[in-house]
Amino acid sequence: MNKDALRFCRRILKEVSRSFSLTIPMLDSEIKNAVMIVYLQDRLLDNFEDELPELADDKRKKLMDKVVEIFNPAHRQEPPETQEIQGYADEFIDDSLKVLTANVNLLWEAYHGLDSYVKARSFHWLKEMNSGMQKYLDQEIKTFSDLDEYCYYVAGTVGGFLSDLIIAKFNLNKGQAKILKDNFNEAGLFLQKVNITRDIREDILNRDRIFWPLEQLGLKRDQLLSRDFKEKSLLALQKMLENIEKHVPALIEYYNALPDEASGYKRFFAVNNALGLATIDRLSNNEAVFYSSKPVKASKLEFMAIMKSPERKLYEYAEEIM
């Protein structure tokens, strides 16, 4: 694998995601580089879906298709789409996203160095992610069923790739593999819904789209941040959290099926999801979700406790819900 490309990926990961730059290094050596590279390719696609509001949707979709095509494993040489995507680097406001986009050629170099199975599975899931993202560029999320489908496309697909990777790289029996395949989607939905619930204020203020199913919740966008509708907004928040909590049993079933030899992945999974569970606890009946300029998140003490004993905290938080 190209060492310069790998160094770039490690450096840019720290800039585009504080949370995953913390947990990806925990992963087992067999899968660490693959997860990092595929996370960055997914993030690149997500950026074109979400971070360029001035783009017309037809143009956005074409560019998203080009991002996916860059990572078609059939390419033996750097594909021409890399240069076109690089040309949009300066359109991003965030400097880290500019750097990621401007250096997509290095990301492709790193990806090209992965083994053929990993490239094939990552490409499969990237295409699936893209198809769903494009569907919901045209379709509003009105119901919890819509929310489940959207979250599958943007996060369940990530769980699908990770589960394929674990099954391929570690020794699982048929029962363990089946449990991972049966539950990876709910595990992905869990964290995505936590983020969607937590970020509602930022999405309303800064984005054209929001992801709460307002029609089923009986609210309008402009009511959520109005104190005149505080009781209705808090009730909607509780409904969002109840919907998230239904995924927790599958989350634990998935974790329990992971092989002990994948100790790094188990720690990665436990930390990310324990933090998600701690965030749920903070969000509950918390009007700051709607009225505070600071995001609601786990306290530093909770964070430190999770980092010290991630599995124990995962079980503790889950038991309170289950």
Image: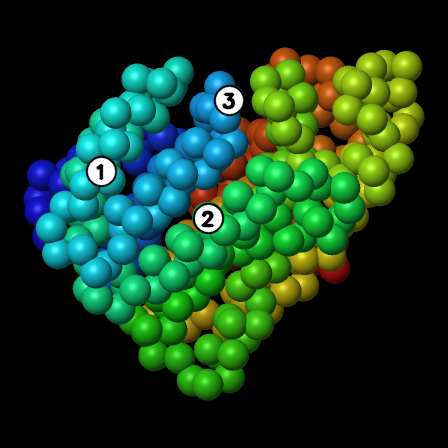
How far across and how far down the image is residue 128, in percent? 47, 56
Name the residue type under label 1.
Thr
Q: Is residue 92 left or right of residue 131?
A: left
How busy is the neighbourhood of tag 1: few (under 14 within 10 Å), some, or many (20 plus)?
many
Q: Residue at the location (67% across, 57% down)?
A: 247
Question: Marks 1 and 2: CB-CB under 8 Å?
Answer: no
Mark drawn on residue 82: 1
Name the residue type under label 3.
Pro
Return the residue at label 3.
53
How busy is the neighbourhood of tag 3: few (under 14 within 10 Å), some, or many (20 plus)?
some
Q: Residue at the location (68% across, 47% down)?
A: 147
How busy is the neighbourhood of tag 2: few (under 14 within 10 Å), some, or many (20 plus)?
many
Q: Residue at the location (61% across, 59% down)?
A: 186
Mark drawn on residue 130: 2
Question: Marks 3 and 1: CB-CB under 8 Å?
Answer: no
Tell me the distance, in whole angstroms, between the alpha carbons under discs 3 and 1. 21 Å
Which quarter of the rendered picture does the C terminus lie within?
A: bottom right
Q: Secondary structure at mark 1?
A: helix
Tell me the distance, in whole angstroms, between the alpha carbons under discs 1 and 2. 17 Å
Q: Is residue 158 left or right of residue 9?
A: right
How far across and how far down the image is residue 272, in percent? 49, 47
In front of the other: 71 or 81: 81
Q: Is residue 321 left or right of residue 268?
A: right
Q: Earlier in the sequence, mark 3 or mark 1?
A: 3
Q: Earlier in the sequence, mark 3 or mark 2?
A: 3
